[in-house]
Amino acid sequence: MKKLMPFLLTLLFLGAIAIIFIALAKKEAPITVVTNNFEGKPLPIKLNKTNDTECAMLIKTQTNAAEVIAPDRKTWFFDDPGCMVKWIQNKPFKKKAKLWVFTIDTKRWIDAKKAFYTTTYHSAMHYGFGAMEKNSSKTINFHTMVQRMLHNQTMANPKFRKKLLGTSNE
Amino acid sequence: MNKILLNQKVIIYLSIETLLLLLATIAFFIAFKIVKNWDINSFTPNQFTLERENYLFITLVQMLLFFSIFDTIYFIYVIDKLHLFIPGAMCAAGVINANSFGVPLLLLKLFFIFLLLLWQNINILDLREKTFPYTKIKASFFIIIFLALIAIIYFDINYFFHLKTNLPVSCCSTLYGQLEGQNPLPFNLDTKLLLILFYLLFIVVFGALIGEVAFLILLATPLFLYIAYYSVTYFFGTYIYELPTHKCPFCMFQKEYYYIGYLIWGSLFLGTFFALIWAIDALLFKIWQKKLKLIAQISLFLFVIICSSYVAFYYFKNGVFL
Amino acid sequence: MIDIQNLTKKVQPNQTILDNISFRVKKGELVIVKGVSGSGKTTLLSILATLDKPTSGKVLINNQAVHKLPDLHLSLFRAQHIGFVAQHFNLIEHLSVYDNLLIAKGALTNSIKEAKSDITKALKQANILHKKDAIVKNLSGGEKQRTAIARALVNCADILLFDEPTAALDSKNSQTFLELLQNLHKMQKTIIVATHDPIFDTLKAKTFIMQDGKLYE
Ligand SMILES: Nc1ncnc2c1ncn2[C@@H]1O[C@H](COP(=O)(O)OP(=O)(O)O)[C@@H](O)[C@H]1O
Ligand SMILES: [Mg+2]
C-alpha cells in the first residue's frame, strides 16, 4: 500500500490535469476582443459568441452592431452604436481609432463617422440610434449622435423619449 | 490632500509598513555583510562581530514575519472598513479594485508571508546544526525578500495615493459577477468540474502529505490553491452568503458572516504554504519535518470541512441546493 | 582538552581586557590563575565558561570551537561540560539547596529518579547534603559556596571553573575548600581556579600569572 500510494496519487493528479484539458477543449469562451486584425477591416461578428465590451451582453444580431479598431489593430465589438460611443470616450486612442457600424438600410459595414442615425430605432440597449448609410429628414449625423449620447438625450431617458416620440408624431 | 490618506486606519497601516521597512533595511545591511564576509572557520574580530549581528538579523526577520502576518490581516480589515468612504463599494472587493494597484498588492503581501515563512524554516534548520550551514543561503534569500518588500511599499504608496473618494467604483457583484455568456472560471471550467477538481486536488495534496510524496505536493499545491480560490469565490461563497448571485471573496470578512473569511482564507494559506515548505525541505534539504506536515494537514482539512459544511448545512436546512 | 590561541577581549576599541592569550590545559589538570584585582581573571573565566564571547582568537574545548556554536547548542554544551562557581555564587537565594540543584539538573534530564540520585551524589561530593532542605539565604558563606560547587557537579561536568573561591571565606573554611579541591582533582576533573589569595601557593599545581590582560607562566 505504501509503495502504491505515490503511484495512485500521481494518477489522480494526472486525472485533474486531464479534466482541465478536457474543459479547455470543450467550448470556446465568448470573444470580447480580437487582436492582430491586420487588414483593419471590420470583422464578421460570431453571433451569440461575442461580448459587447461596454454592456457585457452577447451580440445577437449584426444589424446596427458596431466595431472599434484601435491603431494597434485590436478590435472590439458592440451591439449598439450608443455603447461604442460611450465606451470610447475615455480611451487614449479615441481620435485615431477606426469606428464602424453595420447599417440597417444597406446592410453593410461603413465608417461610423460618415453614417447617419435615426433616433427612435429599437436598438439593443434602447438608446434609439439606428445606423443608416443614406441621409434623410429623420436622421442626424455622427457628431450630433455623440453629443446626444453624452448628454443623455436618448430613448433610454424617459423624459427625452417623450420629446422624441412627440416630435415624430407631428 | 487625499481624504483617504488622513484616515486613521490608513495612517496606522502605513506607519506599520514604514516600521517594517525600517526593520528590513537594518536586516538587509547585515544580510549583505553576511553574504560578503561570513566564514564560520575564521576567528577574526570581524567574524565574531558578524556572528553577534547574525542573531540581530535573525531576530529582525522573525519580527518582520510576525508583523507581516498581523499587518496583512490588518490590511484586509482596513480596506474592508474603507468601503464606507468609497462611493459604490460595498465591501473590500470594490476598494481593492478601485485602482490597478490593489490586487497585485494583496497578492504580493501573501507571497511575502510565504517567503518569510520559508526563510524562518531554513533558519530553524540552520540553527539545528552546529556549523551554521545555511546562514549564507539565508542571507542571500533575505535580499530577495527585501526586494519584495520594496515592491510592496511601492504598491502601497501607489494604491493609497490613487484611492479616490470621489470616483465611484464597482461593487463586488459587477466585479465577480458574470458577463453574459462569459465564464469567469479558469480553464473554461463549469461549476461541476470546478468542484470535482477541488476535491480531487485536495485528496491528492492531503494524500501526498500522508504518503510524503514531496514532488507531487510541489506540483499539486499551487494548482489546489488556485482552484480553491475560485471554488470559494464562485461556489462556496454563495452558500456563505446564501445568495446564488453573491460571488465575492471579500464580503465574508464582514461581521454579518461572523468574520468567517479570516478562518477560511487563513486556513487555506496556512495549509498550502506549510505543505509547500514541507515539500521544499524534503526535496532540497532531505529533511522531513513532522510538525510542519501535521499543521499543513490540519489546516487543509479544516479548510475543506468549513467550506463543505456551509453547503451541507444549507442543504440540511432548506432541502435544496442553491 | 582546553586549547586557547590568541584570545583577545576588548570591551571598547581602545580598552583591551585580555591581550592575545594562549595556553593549554590537559584533561584532569589543576590550574591556578593568579593576578591582582582588575587583571582580567573573571573575564577569562567567563569566556571559558562560554558566558561571554571573545573579540578574536580560538577557544577549543574538547576540540570544539565552543563560541562558534549556535546559542542552543552552546547552552547544551555549557550544561553538560562546564561547572562554574562564580565569585558571588549566583544562587537563587529564596529557594532551598535541593531546589537550586534541581533547576540546574532539570534542563538535562527526563527522569525524576535519575535527577534525585544525581543531586544527592553531588550534595555528598560537595559535603553539603546535611543542609539540603535549608533556604539558601540562611546559609553561611562557606555553605553557600559548597552549594554552588554541588550545583557545578550535578550534571557531571568535566570542567570546573572557580572565581575567587576563598574571597568570602575565613582561613578555616579556606582550608576546607582546599581539601575539597584536591578531592575534585582526584576525581579527574579539569579545574581552573582564578584567585589572588596566597593560600593557593601551598598547592601543587600548574600556575599562571595574569597581569594587565596578559598571561605569564
Ligand atoms: N563589561 C565591561 N565593560 C568595561 N570594563 C570591563 C568590563 N568587564 C570588565 N571590565 C574591566 O576589565 C578589567 C578586568 O576585569 P576582571 O576580569 O573582572 O578582573 P579580575 O577578575 O581579575 O578582577 C577591569 O578593569 C574591569 O573594570
Ligand atoms: Mg574578578
Image (cartoon, coloured by chain):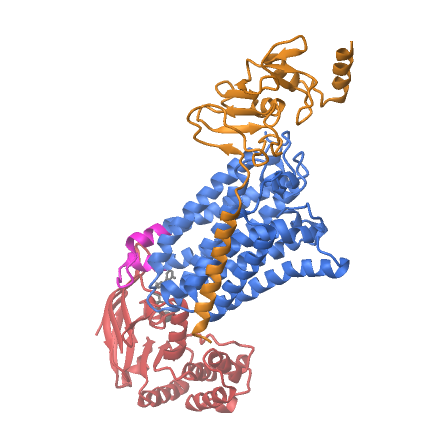
Q: Is residue B38 above or below residue B168?
A: below
Q: Which residue is situated farthest in the left direction here?
A: C217
Is B87 on the left-hand or right-hand side of C208? right
- Residue visible at 68% across and 46% down? B246
Q: Write down the quadrant of residue B182 in the picture.
A: top right
Q: Which quadrant of the picture is home to ligand 1? A: bottom left
Is C6 on the left-hand or right-hand side of B172? left
Q: Quadrant of the N terminus of chain B?
A: top right
Colour in which chain C is drawn: red
Q: Write down the quadrant of residue B115 in the picture.
A: bottom left
| Chain orange in the figure, letter | A
Residue B150: where, in percent of width, then height?
Answer: 44, 43
| Chain blue in the figure, letter | B
Q: Which is nearer the eye, C13 or A87?
A: A87
Question: In this view of the protein, can residue B212 be seen by the observer?
Answer: no
Q: Is residue B171 above or below residue B273?
A: above
- Residue visible at 56% across and 62% down? B300
- Residue visible at 33% across and 51% down? B33
Q: Count of labels shown? A: 0
Q: Which is nearer the eye, B59 or C177?
A: B59
Is C127 on the left-hand or right-hand side of B48? right
On whether residue A83 falls in the magenta region, the answer is no
Residue A164: where, in percent of width, then height?
Answer: 74, 15
Which SS does the magenta portion mostly show? helix
Question: In this view of the protein, can residue B166 be seen by the observer?
Answer: yes
Residue C123: where, in percent of width, then height?
Answer: 46, 88
The magenta stretch is B31-51
